[in-house]
Amino acid sequence: MIRIYCLDNDHLILVEEEPGSSLPGHALWIDLINPTAEEEKAVEGWLGVDIPTDADMAEIEESSRFYMENGVQYLTVPILYAVDKDHRKTAPVSFVLTPRLLVTVRYSEPRAFTIYIERAMKPGNGLIDAKCNGLSILLGIVEAATDRLADILEGVAEKTEAASQSIFHLRAHERPMTNQDFRRLLTQIGGQGAFLSKVRESLTGVSRLLVYVTANMRASGVGKDKSAWVKSLERDAQSLENYVDFLSNKINFLLDTVVGLISVEQNAIIKIFSVAAVGFMPPTLIASIYGMNFRFMPELAESWGYPMALILMVISAILPLVYFRRKGWL
């Protein structure tokens, strides 16, 4: 699908064009969504640039994600999508920045794009002006992606704090945690940790994109307003990276705590069995003695022999328990 956004005073408008038609002269942004080979060739014909394929976008080397050819910058960044549906995936998005306009190539529907498009198409949005170009569109999308990552991190922080409260603030009247509770906590905390790694991946890509754009801006002499915008985005990305590190440490701490609590519960169970085994050893010894099949055992002939053996077994079971209790082992 080809979506062409053109400048209309202080906002963008969507113009529908077929691959065989010509590109509008006031076009600022060409958004390719799941493009076909025909659509890619059409854009290449309009601009005279190569459009990265799905295989090209999957490359992970930095030299394959950030490079320049014939004055055109190629930037590929992994961006989160389908977060609201709990899919929590990242997909590469390529930005092809020409001196005239911006081309984006994507095979997903990141929420950041929707947010930016809705805002940029409103008159008086504060993003679009008469001097707007492809770099302005790129920075606007990056800003929307950064804001989206910040919102996602807030959600991760809330869920992590909820898990922390359930671990460290168990009230006296509440029942102790069961195996199901521990399993739920491990799944919840581990899931947030895995999600956080995807956020870090996306945030790292955004930071690298900004570094690359900054280096090329200095060489091309871009205006101070865009330089200040990029610096602001770099500070935002850096602050989010620091927050990701904080959340990652907290999640690791909570995982270690849950594993430690599981070990404590296991030790308590093992202690119960150990105490039970030690407590039954003396009665078992007495029962074994009187169960021996010797001909001469005087107690067996007496009427008090059987009650005496039972009393000895009970006393021998109670004494170890009393001793363990005084030692604080129970």
Image (cartoon, rainbow, N blue to C red):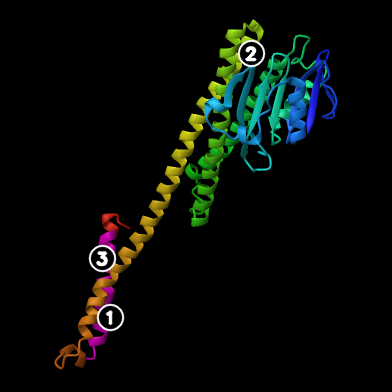
**SS class of the residue under badge 2?**
helix
Q: Nearer the viewer, residue 252 or 263?
A: 252
Q: Position of residue 162 (x, y in %)?
A: 56, 40
The residue tagged 1 is 310
Label 2 or label 3, whichever comes before in sequence order: 2
Disc 1 to disc 3: CB gap under 8 Å: no
What segment is highlighted magenta in the picture? 302-324
For the point 28% across and 63% down, the residue is 322
Residue 221 visible in the shown view = yes
The residue tagged 3 is 320
Q: What type is the residue that disc 3 sits on?
A: Pro
Q: Nearer the viewer, mark 2 or mark 3?
A: 2
Mark 3 neighbour density, 10 Å: few (under 14) some (14–19) many (20 or more): some
- What kind of secondary structure does the magenta stretch mostly adopt? helix
Does 248 appear in magenta?
no
Q: Quadrant of residue 82?
A: top right
Disc 2 to disc 3: CB gap under 8 Å: no
Q: Position of residue 48 (x, y in %)?
A: 72, 20
Q: Quadrant of residue 134?
A: top right
**SS class of the residue under badge 1?**
helix
Label 1 or label 2, whichever comes before in sequence order: 2
For the point 68% across and 39% down, the residue is 84
Residue 165 visible in the shown view = no
Q: What type is the residue that disc 1 sits on?
A: Leu
The residue tagged 2 is 229
